Amino acid sequence: MQIHSQQTPTNQKTTAQARTEITAFKVDSILSLMTLKEKISMCHAQSQFSSPGIPRLGIPELWMSDGPHGIRAEINWSNWGYSGWTNDYITAFPALTCLSATFNPSLSKQYGVSIGEEARYRKKDVLLGPGVNIYRTPLNGRNFEYMGEDPYLASKMVVSYIKGVQMNGVAACVKHFALNNQELWRNHINVQVSDRALYEIYLPAFEAAVKQGEAWSIMGAYNQFRGQHCSHHELLLNKILKTDWSFDGVVISDWGGTHSTKEAALNGLDIEMGSPINTKTSPREAFDANFLGTTFLELVKSGEIDECILNDKVRRILRLMMRTTLDSSRPLGKINNIEHSQVARQVAIEGVVLLKNKEDFFPLNPAKKLTIAVIGENAVKSMTTGGGSSELKANYEISPFKGLQKRFKNASIIFSKGYTSEDSNQNHKSLIKDALLTASSADVVLFIGGLNKNTGQDCEAADREELKLPYNQDYLISELQKVNPNIGVLLVSGNAVSMPWISDVKAVLQTWYLGSEAGNAIADIISGDENPSGKLPFSFPVKLTDNSAHFFGELSYPGDGETQYYKDGILVGYRWHDTKNIKPLFSFGHGLSYSSFKITDIKSDKKIYTANDSINITYNLKNTGSKDGAEVVQVYIGMSNSNVLRALKELKGFKKTYLRAGNQTSEIITINVSDLSFYDESISNWNLEKGSYTIYVGNASDGVSEQINIKVK
């Protein structure tokens, strides 16, 4: 038995090596048969969402699709109009902020498998997602597509997602690489950030996606970094991605993110998408006008650009095809099946975060004959449409109002819109008057508001202008409270909002954009059929200047129109709040339950460690309440006497555990000592400081149960 176990890894390695060698041989064989023009053709689009194959050689096209939480409807060949198909309806999954809030990597894997199956059924080869840009400011219109403010959490969640997607022979395309943290001036803003912040905050999730997730493609960002556009960036693509991280996949530009033939050719871009086309020629030749089209061909022909540069791009594209469209063994896919609905619902349930629950306002008893006033446009507004490239053509979408009606059959549920997000002739005063009248006749008020997918809210290509709720919702909530103090607020958003009314309401639920199963999942939580277990993947500041990006003024966000300076450095999100002792409205990692949990007997396996060691944190977790539920134990580590500025503490481990009421379990969280390193700009490498560290164990960044002191020798 011992001999067999020792030989197995070697055999596996040999098999993997043999597979790689076979793929390389096949790729080189195909490459040798291609003309120069055919090679060039593979490096740019042939339509809005495909790049060419080589029909002469039987090499298929490569078809791509938005987006990260559902497969987008079919787009026309050479414009952004929808094609009007009737067979492109899909399951809408919760947005990635919700997925991240589950703190559940195994559920992220199921999410990836499901969305990968839908992409495969729709005959897509590349899924343009997931997004792992860091939540730096609550004004970023696209934060809802990303995985929050912490690089460790994003790394853990994205790896599982990618593995799930790619099991279907569909490439995940991780985006937007890198430093795309605003929408306002995303196409040109020049980001200036320290190497340390780059490596510690903004790159780790991408690195995990490449090294651990083995992502097959990466999408470059629109913005500039140190004066060069990210979709053809020497440092980001050639040095960091392809050399340091040994990425063997394909770099795809963001749509319209290419600006130069020479930079695109020389600085690591493999497939150019979305560039302007020559509308005067035929659709078959229109995309030859791309930067990596005819101009690139002439530069290679003249010898100004070596053909080996082109060959590397084509090898990568062919390798991607071997993994996707040329893989005859890949599964056929599935779409709109019950299993996908179940995954969407489970992600939604586990992602909903109970922020406040005074006097056990939630759950509401569905057996009681209550009169429930549902107030707010978001109770009935579709949230799968709009928002930019991630908008969806959902097979169905259960609104919060429908979900509540379905579950609370014994209640009398009355509705009033209260506010409107649409430019209309509706009298806003009459909407408020009707809402107050409706609320005054109810036992319970559920205000369902927040943001939406309109431009200037949670939407691509524009940022929010302020932290407060739009459409006069703050005023409406304060007025509702006066006529009925028994009020709970449900926020539908992918971003933090200010809450001047927080002390006047009984409860607050952060419900995100939950997709097809939104209403059912919300009703599951409100009825108590399910126990909330979500945790915030980003901090909610009390006011905008409490956020690190905004504390430093306009040069830090959004910049001066040309350049943006990340003056907050490594102190993003809870790192800023903790280190500067600025109390958030709700902290990173915060999330309540209908049950209660106790973490006890917290210990480290040693007190002194060396660089190659692992730290094993053991603890007992008990569900001390009366309901079954789940708790996320979080481990943060800090070093107070560092030689450089460091955050008070940083997330280094977490584990979500499900427990029946009254039950207890012993758990372990393992952290590599090497993960305590900081990026040392003086040596352009990671540096593990020797000395004393503090381990913080709890259930939120501000909910620490115990501290443990250790030393690294």
Image (cartoon, rainbow, N blue to C red):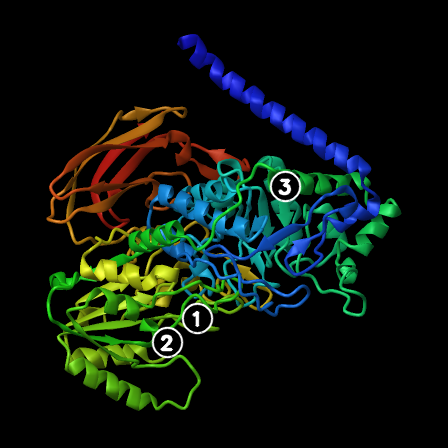
Task: For marks 2 and 3, give the one nearer the viewer.
Answer: 3
Please identify the quarter of the rendering in which residue 675 is found.
Answer: top left
- Residue 683, x across and y down, in percent: 54, 35
Instruction: Looking at the picture, tell me which residue is in the foreground, 47 or 672.
Output: 47
Is disc 2 in contact with disc 3, using a CB cutoff of under 8 Å?
Answer: no
From this view, report whether residue 617 is shown above or below residue 292.
above
From this view, report whether residue 459 is shown above or below residue 129.
below
Amino acid of disc 1: Gln
- The CA distance from mark 2 to mark 3 is 44 Å
Amino acid of disc 3: Leu
Is any atom of residue 541 visible in this view? no
Instruction: Looking at the picture, tell me which residue is in the foreground, 505 or 275.
Output: 275
Position of the N terminus, as image quadrant, is top left
Q: Name the residue under label 2.
A: 470
Relative placement, left or right, of 480 versus 149 is: left
Is any atom of residue 272 visible in this view? yes
Q: Mark 3 points at which residue?
A: 320
- Residue 3, x across and y down, in percent: 44, 8
Q: Is mark 2 on a helix, strand or loop?
A: loop
Q: How crowded is mark 2: few (under 14 residues within 10 Å), some or many (20 or more)?
A: many
Q: Going 40% across and 9% down the picture, which residue do you hit? A: 2
Question: Is tag 3's residue or tag 1's residue first in the polypeptide sequence?
Answer: 3
Is disc 2 in contact with disc 1, using a CB cutoff of under 8 Å?
Answer: yes
- The CA distance from mark 2 to mark 1 is 8 Å
Q: Residues within 10 Å of mark 3 (few under 14, many from 20)?
A: many
Q: Name the residue under label 1.
A: 457
